Image (cartoon, grey):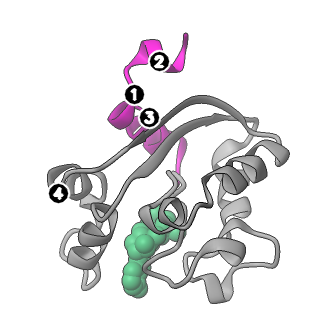
Amino acid sequence: MIKPDATAKGYIGAILQMINEAGFKIVALKMTRLTDEDARAFYKIHQGKPFFENLVDFMTSGKIVAAVLEKENAVEDFRTLLGSTNPQEAAQGTIRNKFAESISYNAVHGSDSDENAQIESDFFFVEEEVYA
Ligand code: ADP
Ligand code: MG
């Protein structure tokens, strides 16, 4: 998911290009806006953490781009392409190194397991959109 900070700053094209150039196939894509309820559900694992309310406010502050990506070893390789959650610790040339402004507003989300990738794909897309 490309987060509201990156969509607002016009980074959608550059980020999708980096994703393609890293060998990911984009199999589903949509621009939308999360409701408060959506954001709370998507990030429910972080409920109760000190940054949770700020995260919900941020994720509902503008449009996001949701994508389903395909690649061998996709979850791990995408996390590598993303860089660390805190952009100050993100490796040179990663998406967060280039486009994130802070640990809170960090440009892109990536699933952290195959199981969560399936859950998050289902969150945004029906099966026919992914496997058309
Ligand atoms: P990641 O997005 O790298 O998987 P997490 O799952 O730990 O990171 O956190 C989800 C999102 O919550 C982060 O991408 C970031 O937007 C926000 N976040 C995480 N940790 C913090 C923090 N310490 N302070 C502020 N926001 C945070
Ligand atoms: Mg995470």
The disc, 4 or 3, on the residue closer to the chain's N-terminal end is: 4
Question: Distance between the Cα atoms at labels 2 and 3?
Answer: 10 Å
Q: Is residue 96 above or below residue 20?
A: below
- Residue that numbered label 3 is attached to: 121
| Extent of the magenta region | 112-132
Q: Residue at x 76, y 48 (%)?
A: 17
Question: Distance between the Cα atoms at labels 2 and 1?
Answer: 6 Å
The disc, 1 or 4, on the residue closer to the chain's N-terminal end is: 4
Image location of residue 6, percent across then percent down: 53, 65
Q: Is residue 65 above or below residue 109?
A: above
Question: Distance between the Cα atoms at labels 1 and 4?
Answer: 18 Å
The disc, 2 or 4, on the residue closer to the chain's N-terminal end is: 4
Q: Residue at x 77, y 78 (%)?
A: 91
Image quarter in which the C terminus is found = top right
- Residue that numbered label 4 is attached to: 36
- Residue that numbered label 1 is attached to: 125
Relative to residue 31, is residue 15 drawn left or right? right
Q: Secondary structure at mark 2?
A: helix
Residues at circles 1 and 4 in contact by the CB criterion of under 8 Å: no
Image location of residue 118, percent across then percent down: 45, 34
Q: Nearer the viewer, mark 3 or mark 1?
A: 1
- Residue that numbered label 2 is attached to: 129
Relative to residue 101, is residue 119 drawn left or right? left
Q: Secondary structure at mark 1?
A: loop
Residues at circles 3 and 1 in contact by the CB criterion of under 8 Å: yes
Amino acid type shown at disc 1: Phe
Q: Residue at x 47, y 69 (%)?
A: 5
Question: Distance between the Cα atoms at labels 3 and 1?
Answer: 6 Å
Amino acid type shown at disc 4: Asp
Which residue appears farthest toward the left when viewing the image? 37
